[in-house]
Every structure is written in C-alpha cells, then in structure tokens.
Amino acid sequence: MSTILIGGAGFIGSRLARRLLERGEHVLVIDNLCRGRRAFLQDMPGHAHLEFVEADAADPDALLRVCTPFHARFPTAVVRHMAANSDIPAGIADPAVDLRDTFMTTYAALQVMKTLGLKRLAFASSSAVYGDHGPETLLREESGPLLPISNYGAMKLASEALIGAAAESFLDRALIFRFPNVVGIPATHGVILDFIRKLRTSPGRLEVLGNGTQQKAYLHVEELVEAMLFIEERASGKLSLYNIGPEDAGCRVSDIAEAVVARVAPRADIVYGTEERGWVGDVPKFRYCVDKLARLGWKPRLSSLEAVRRAVEEIAAQEGLC
Ligand SMILES: NC(=O)c1ccc[n+]([C@@H]2O[C@H](COP(=O)([O-])OP(=O)(O)OC[C@H]3O[C@@H](n4cnc5c(N)ncnc54)[C@H](O)[C@@H]3O)[C@@H](O)[C@H]2O)c1
C-alpha cells in the first residue's frame, strides 16, 4: 500500500503518517511547512518508507511534479488530503489565505489525481461547513442549509462540493470526514496551546477570548486517526461523508481554561471577555450527531473533557512544562 499525504507534516497529518508507517505503507508527505514541521516526521517507525517533499500543494503543476515519480515507484492507493489554513481569523482578515490553502489544495489534488488516474481520496473537512445553527440543533451529515460563517468553512464546503463532482466523473472512492475540534500533540494551533503560551508570557492572568460559555465537541487526535482508518475499511459507496466526534455535547471554553490554569499556573486569574463568540467566524456552540459513525461500529473512548484534559498534559509537556 502507498499513500500520498498532503499536509502530512502538520498536527493531524503527522499523526496519520505515523500510523500508516506502522502498518507498513509507503508514505509521501507533501507540505509547504507554513505550519507543519519536519521535526514532526522524525523518529517515525518504518522511516525508510517515508518520503518528504516541501512543496506548495495549492499549485497543481508543483504537486504533479512531486507526485508523478513517487506514483511511478509505488502505485498510489490513496491520496489523503490534510492541508488547509488552520488559522480561521487569518482567513477572515485575508480571504486569499483560505482560497489558496483550504480550497486550491483540494482543486490541485483532484487535478493531479485525474492526470495520474488516482481513484481514492480521503479528505479532512470540518464542522465549520455547517455554519451556526445554535446549540439546540443536532448537526447530522445531511443537515442544512450549509452556510459557513468563516472563509475557512466556506472553502471546506467548496472543497466538499468539488470532491462530490469528481466522484461523479473520475474517482472510485471519496471519503469526506467532518472533524470536530481535535486536540493532542504535536500541537500547532488551538485553544489549549494558545492558553499555555499566554500563561507563559503572563503567568498571573489568562485572558480568554469570549465569555467562556462557547461549547464544542473535542476529540483526541489518536482517536481521530483511528476513526478515519476505521471508516476507510468499513464504509461503502463511491462518496461517503462522516461526522467524526465524541457522543457528548462537548465542553466549555471555561472548562478548558480551568484545566490549563490548574496544570500550568494554578494561581492565575481567568479573565473572560463579554462576547458570546471568541472571534469573528467562531461558531460559539454546536452539537454534532455521530450516530452514522456509531452505526458503522466506531465510538470514541474519551469524552470531550477527557480528551481536553489529556491534551493539556501532552501540550504542557510539549511546551517544556514539567
Ligand atoms: N485541528 C482541528 O481541530 C481540525 C478541525 C477540523 C478540521 N481540521 C482539518 O484537518 C486538517 C489538518 O489540520 P491540523 O489541525 O493538523 O492543522 P495543521 O495546520 O497542523 O496542518 C495543516 C498542514 O497543511 C500544511 N499546508 C497548509 N497549506 C499548504 C499548502 N498550500 N501546501 C502544502 N502544505 C500546506 C501546513 O503546513 C500544515 O502542516 C486540515 O485540513 C484542517 O482544516 C482540523
């Protein structure tokens, strides 16, 4: 088996790369390192089967130049597309960011797949495609209307649409995974890392964006990778779409702030803002329905809060806090 893993030097991509290498796959990681790190790919099991190329995956010609020789040596079974802009506020400030890193990477991946005759795609989408339906609405795969409130969500939704069209014309198999908030290491971004870094700079005070009542589903990265591979093995059909997440209603930003303060700076004051949302484009509360995934046979072991608590420990260690 061999995989082309786009965005594979990032947080989730590098954890997926590790898992694929453990099961003996040849893996080509393509990443422009705008957020990912080569160091995340060090000490991988079966590292002789790992190749890394630094390239802009939003450029179809560059992507084709990288993929062609790898595919000639190791006929590629699956393209796994994990690249995107992961800084939602940056994409609100400048829509070109998500057009390039969240959408054009998908466009380029599909172009290359068509040219090389690659037929299987696994795509990292997001709960952000749903937009803001309020905390009472249980978001199912078929929920709509899909009206994202961030450029990131909009470009993920546009990517899903393009994949749908490609499945109709030349793909044999397309899997779209809608992730919730994913936590763990190596952390490149996210609320836990932000809080820890803020507390390192000012250990007496943690300023939280928003009033702390934002409530979302959190999943540990280890379980996310397990779920993706499980779905790949079990799901049938040309185009499959799955919410991946915990079964609970999520946890609050105030729970996360308290967990980080308790671990990193127990005497710090937590100072909340007054807004319901943390930033423009933030969906303050959402509730995921993961029944489809449960019916397929997979459930996470950790609740949102357990995943967060575990990630707080891991990220504190990553940041050198013993
Ligand atoms: N982490 C989460 O909570 C979460 C939630 C929902 C969806 N997702 C999706 O999961 C995927 C992985 O996210 P992550 O959290 O690991 O983020 P990440 O930023 O750590 O990883 C994304 C990787 O893509 C790379 N990349 C970005 N633009 C690129 C380009 N033009 N060319 C080549 N490489 C490029 C980055 O360098 C990075 O290594 C993304 O598609 C993201 O949208 C993540």
Image (tube, rainbow, N blue to C red):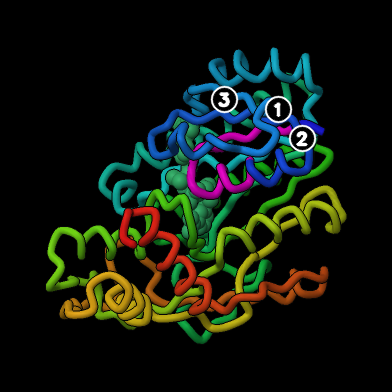
Q: Amino acid at mark 3?
A: Phe
Q: Residues within 10 Å of mark 1 (few under 14, many from 20)?
A: some
Residue 105 position (above or below residue 264): above
| First to last magenta residue range | 3-17
Q: Earlier in the sequence, mark 2 or mark 3?
A: 2
Q: Amino acid at mark 1?
A: His
Separation of disc 2 and disc 3 at Cα? 14 Å
Q: Give the x, y percent position of residue 72.
A: 77, 14
Query: Pointer 3: what residue?
Result: 52
Residue 274 visible at all = no
Q: Nearer the viewer, mark 1 or mark 3?
A: 1
The residue positioned 79% from the left and 52% from the top of the image is: 232
Check if mark 1's residue and mark 2's residue have beta carbons within 8 Å: yes
For residue 49, the mark is 1
For residue 25, the mark is 2
For residue 33, the mark is none
